[in-house]
Amino acid sequence: MFEITKIQLDHQRNPIGVNTLPKLSWALECDQRDVVQTNYQLQISKQAEFEEILYDSYYVKSSQSMNIELPEVSCEDFTKYYMRVRVKSNKLEETKWATTYFVTGYVQTKCSASMITIEDTLKLENAETYYVRKEFDSNKEIESVYCVATAFGLYKLHLNGEQVGDYKLTPGWTSYTNNLMYQVYDVTSMMIEGKNTIGAMVGAGWYKGSFGFDRRSNMYGDQAGFLCEVHIKYTDGSSQVIASDDSWKGHLSPIVMANIYDGETYDARKEIAGWSLAGLDTKNWVDLTTISYDQQILRPQICEPVQVIDQIEPTELFMTPEKDQVIDFGQNMSGLVELKVKGKKDDVIELNFFEVLDKDGNVYLDNLRGAKQTITYIFAKDEEIVYLPTFTFQGFRYARIKEFPGEAKVENFLALVISSGMERTGYIETSNEEVNQLVHNILWGLNGNFVDVPTDCPQRDERMGWTGDAQVFARTACYLKNCYSFYKKYLVDLAYDQTEEGGVPHVVPDVLSGHGEDNFLISQGTDSAAGWADAAVIIPWTLYQVYGDDDILSTQYDSMKAWIDFMRKHSEDYIWSYKLQFGDWVALDAEEGSYFGATPNPLMCAAYSAYSTQLFINSAKVLGNQKDVIFYTDYLSKIVDKYHREFFDEKGQLKVQTQTAHIISLYFDLVPVGSKELVAEGLIKLLEKENGHLVTGFLGTPYFCSALSQNGKVKEAYDLFLKNDFPSWLYQVKMGATTIWEHWDGIKPDGSMWSPDMNSFNHYAYGAIGEWIQRTMVGIEVDDLNPGYSHYYIQPLVDSRFSFVKGSLMTQFGEIKSKWELDDGKVTLSIRVPVNTSCTILLKQANEIVESDVNQTFIKGEDGLSICVGCGDYKVTFSLK
Ligand code: BGC
């Protein structure tokens, strides 16, 4: 067996609407060892059967299977191109053809549609929404029809009475003034001969709906608008374009209130039957006007849009002690509830969504702050309705049934989980059920917060793209799902929203800067905090390590450099400082009532600047920018030198006695030569002082276990990881969490809550421990010199409290697997290495090899026993030291 199992284009499945040719990668699978690709052949055609071939590479002698640039084929607009690949191996086998496709958008032409709005004609309340529609004729035999759509706000597209596509919250959230994504849909099969009708519902969304700390409206503009172009190709070679313009008509829609935080009210009495069908009487519809916009901001969708990724039936419907009827979905999530309910005219359904029950088992809404998270439906007549909200989403596990026609039953409700539609790539399972639940919670933290933008939380009136949270979780996220395109989109906006000086906003898209002074964060500074702004460098570097595509480094290079230079500019004697710093946010060593951890800002700033500068130098090396390598290497040595002088005493001990100072000094390699052991010991002492517990916040926690296990303290790392009393990762699990909490004591041991001001139960930041689980427990580790797992390490560190730990990771080459089982002091490691890759098995804890089906002998080195193997399945049993 030798076959191509997966093809990706620009790290996605089948991109639609591209205006440049995507890069191609394929994964191979075989049942033999040491197989590598020797040749590949690539063809491009407009037909699925490849009758006419536009390009044939013939067999190319190459082992490359990742991020292959396509030849210059001149492409037409809005056309589907098929590509197929086959491969030969060093064992003289040949795969079958594997076929994929992409669809072009504006390659030759530009969009000429107008952004249309109802808001000049009708005065809309901020949360009101409207319909737009246009009839058009199409009388010839159709070859293909593609529809381009976007909005200032949110839109739901219809053609001939049916919804187009199943994406949610389109066009997503970007730095709209610079970057507005459009989606392209294949609507060929939805067309009818004769009169067709294209229409949309338009809502305020992030663009102009009330949002942010002070619930400001009109962040990006004060009129919601819609833009659309239908591209029809006929079989006779002719074509037609229907574009949004002021000949379209508009009407208020039955969604009388829609807001990201507050929910939606649907008044079915205001529904217009057949609103997107031809032949409707539109005498009550009003004229639309156009909003001027800059053509340059229009970009094709570059990542997987938000969509329904799962469905969850309620586990229970119950009455609380305070006599509220509550539905429990058993899982905290971002989603929408589909209602299937019978009612009579004017009957009302009202649901309030929330995350947790309070101490007494009653509805707890306080941590939602101002977010109402309420869905209301008003019946137009006696009927059974199926209703799903459109321009909102909720962060919830529970819903309170405030009003309902008749008796509510579980069958009336179905939760649809929404998230950006990335492919799941990583799986972990261990012999410890609490750890398995933690892994589940980390994944659901990702699901709930990767809603087009990596947000801090999905429930309260915040839900913003906090850079610090995004940065600490990036590596973990890339183990769980294919996050390349998701973060690529985020980084485009990050670069757009950087300040002129290169400062990086606390949130991307930046909805804080320039929006008033009265909030604490807004008045103190809305950009450039250590560990937050470093997202500009850490995320591109992480993507390069994991996906091996240096495009991300070249695209982000200026943005990365601007951030490094910002820190340089604001430095005095190599330590930078600037307005508001979050430091080790929400650490438990903070003073009573404060969110700011005890580790001083100068140390945090200097440590992060050293780390980011190192990653920037690495990036400059990859791109061959020698001048920058030399300059910034010299600069880095000065930061490090200052760090040593400022924060260490003559014995090599840290002057700052916090866990986080020790963790980041160790993890960022900022400890003076020869003092690592001392600093690691110092960290253990600080742990002992806390009875073995962490007291770290957002910046110290992610690397705590790594700082220990990388410095010979493997048992201590596991001790910390396996704690399950407060504060610890597993404490939340024990308290019934199904996602990751913002605070170690979100719910205290006595059932009371942390302050409702800031108490999210779906906040992925502390889930960054997922990175340690994958890299250290499972032991799958990248090799920076051969990124994207073309060569990698399997180097698990085992602990006797587990009888097995296993994990897998779908890379662009194929699936990596690693499993260790511990029995009677002996470890059996079983691994799978994908075709076209090689793997170094490094056994740091091995005494000797007991049994092995690897043909070569393990080499004894400083780090332990090691061997480099090619593709295949292997099993090694070794005794522990
Ligand atoms: C957010 C965090 C964020 C922090 C920065 C909070 O309100 O929820 O996750 O990183 O502010 O201070």
Image (cartoon, rainbow, N blue to C red):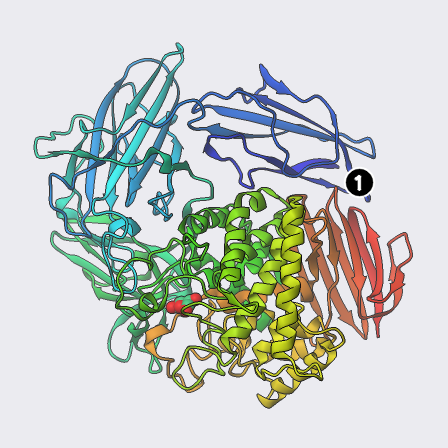
Q: In which quarter of the image is ligand 1?
A: bottom left
Q: Where is residue 580 in the image (x, y as percent from the top left)?
A: 41, 69
- Viewer-nearest residue: 83 or 690: 690
Provide the secondary structure element on which disc 1 rests: loop
Q: Where is residue 489 in the image (x, y as percent from the top left)?
A: 46, 46
Q: Is the C terminus in the top left, top right, bottom left or bottom right quadrant?
A: bottom right
Q: Hey, what amino acid is under mark 1? A: Val
- Viewer-nearest residue: 873 or 299: 299
* Residue at 56% across, 45% down: 552
Q: Position of residue 321 (x, y in %)?
A: 28, 80
Splitting the image into 4 quarters, where does residue 466 fall?
Answer: bottom left
Image: 460 above or below 14: below
Determine if residue 391 is in view: no
Which residue position is annotated with label 1?
35
Q: Is the N terminus in the top left, top right, bottom left or bottom right quadrant?
A: top right
Q: In this view, does 27 lie to the left or right of 465?
A: right
Q: Residues within 10 Å of mark 1 (few under 14, many from 20)?
A: many
